[in-house]
Image (cartoon, rainbow, N blue to C red):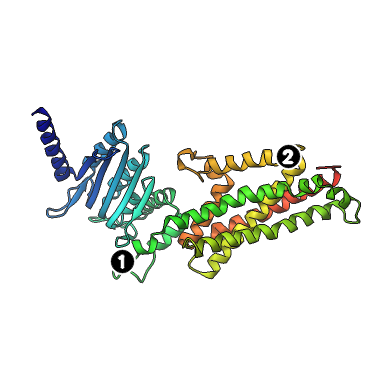
């Protein structure tokens, strides 16, 4: 009898939570997940007019704190179907969701407009259904506005906080978000852009293909470079080459250039295989795919040159240094799991920088980061190759 009473009370409490707060804690499966809904207008310091569905931030904030502090709750799911609302209230909720240390995900259903966009990207994983839309537009103010420069600066600062948050919690740059926000010709009586789930949704294979290509470059091509000269020495052909009229510097650069074609062909095979076999999608345009291929090839060239330098500097087999080094770089850059991502450190590692440049190119068509990485790779290749050739010229053996 007591069990039946407890089940009845629990059911009644769950129903009240859904009706009053739009939340429910799911504990019937193998995990306990707190489900939070953000619907209608996000209500801030002023109450919305009667007849409007609202999400009151004073109701949501305690729930987020409870979800974080309750040891029984293992994850957070935020369902969004909002038209936007109060900027400060929306940013407050977004900051709290982003600060939750437990696994979290947001799912946009129907719409995630205006200030709903920071909420949509605030969790560790963000999803949108194909039929959902999101409207990006500048901030606006209802009520009395003073026509003074200070008001305009206040608007700019408010918009910058929104833009900065979105850029910090997604793969989109501030420039790209601003361009979408100030776009004209799409909305009838406003400026901005309407994004739909069908246009921004990507399959996991699209991300996986880019990540695997970058991983292959840093693992196989650095090893390829480190063994280029040592393999020649092991089979005694390097000693014969020393006796030829070709100088050591030309020999070094010849090995560097000769190692590049197999690496470039490997990059092309990975891209084509992932497209035609697994259905991965890279860039929408031929120019974008060409830039991506150049990005991967230049990274291969830089990896080979670094590997050759390591192979020259050490006496022991180069693989014993290069393999742990590449695995550590990939591990701490978040290639295997975001759980080991260290802010301020992981985002400075080469694999992470290359991956983010490739993601911005494939997902948003932004080539600035990719071109910058290409320039850096060429500069690194030139510097490391000159140092390696100088050391190889004076060393008796590798």
Are the residues flagged by discs 1 and 2 in contact, CB closer than 8 Å? no
- Let me know if residue 77 appears in the view: yes
Circle 2: element type: loop
Label 1 sits on residue: 190
- Across and down, in percent, residue 11 comes to 13, 38
Front-lying residue, 224 or 303: 224
* Residue 160 as seen in the image, left or right of residue 379: left
Q: What residue sits 72% from the left and 43% below the top?
A: 310
Residue pushed farthest top?
A: 2
Residue pushed farthest front?
A: 235
Residue 29 lies, with reference to residue 385, above or below; the image says above
- Across and down, in percent, residue 12 comes to 11, 38
Q: What residue sits 14% from the left and 45% below the top?
A: 19
- Let me know if residue 196 appears in the view: no
- Across and down, in percent, residue 253 comes to 78, 55
Label 2 sits on residue: 317
């Amino acid at each position: 009898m007591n069990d039946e009473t407890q089940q009845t009370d629990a059911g009644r409490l769950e129903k009240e939570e859904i009706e009053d707060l739009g939340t429910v804690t799911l504990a019937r499966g193998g995990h306990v997940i707190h489900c939070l809904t953000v619907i209608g207008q996000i209500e801030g310091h002023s109450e919305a007019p009667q007849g409007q569905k609202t999400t009151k931030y004073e109701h949501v904030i305690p729930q987020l704190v409870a979800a974080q502090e309750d040891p029984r709750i293992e994850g957070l799911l935020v369902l969004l179907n909002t038209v936007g609302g109060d900027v400060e209230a929306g940013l407050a909720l977004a900051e709290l969701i982003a600060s939750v240390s437990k696994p979290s995900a947001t799912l946009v259903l129907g719409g995630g407009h205006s200030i709903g966009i920071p909420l949509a990207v605030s969790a560790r994983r963000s999803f949108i259904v194909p039929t959902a839309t999101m409207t990006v537009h500048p901030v606006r103010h209802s009520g009395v506005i003073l026509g003074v420069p200070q008001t305009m600066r206040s608007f700019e600062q408010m918009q910058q906080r929104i833009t900065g948050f979105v850029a910090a919690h997604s793969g989109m740059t501030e420039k790209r978000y601003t361009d979408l926000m100030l776009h004209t010709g799409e909305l009838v009586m406003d400026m901005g852009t309407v994004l739909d789930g069908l246009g921004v949704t990507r399959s996991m294979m699209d991300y996986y293909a880019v990540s695997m290509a970058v991983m292959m470059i840093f693992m196989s091509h650095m090893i390829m470079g480190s063994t280029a000269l040592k393999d020649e020495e092991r089979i005694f052909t390097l000693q014969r080459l020393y006796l030829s009229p070709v100088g050591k510097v030309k020999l070094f650069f010849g090995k560097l250039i000769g190692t590049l074609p197999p690496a470039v062909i490997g990059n092309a095979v990975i891209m084509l295989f992932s497209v035609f076999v697994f259905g991965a999608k890279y860039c929408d345009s031929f120019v974008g795919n060409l830039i991506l291929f150049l990005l991967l090839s230049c990274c291969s060239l830089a990896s080979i040159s670094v590997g050759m330098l390591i192979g020259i500097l050490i006496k022991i087999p180069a693989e014993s240094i290069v393999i742990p080094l590449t695995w550590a770089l990939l591990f701490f850059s978040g290639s295997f799991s975001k759980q080991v991502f260290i802010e301020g450190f992981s985002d400075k590692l080469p694999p992470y920088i290359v991956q983010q440049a490739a993601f911005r190119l494939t997902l948003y068509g932004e080539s600035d980061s990719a071109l910058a990485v290409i320039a850096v790779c060429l500069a690194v290749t030139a510097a490391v190759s000159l140092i390696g050739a100088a050391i190889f010229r004076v060393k008796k053996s590798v």
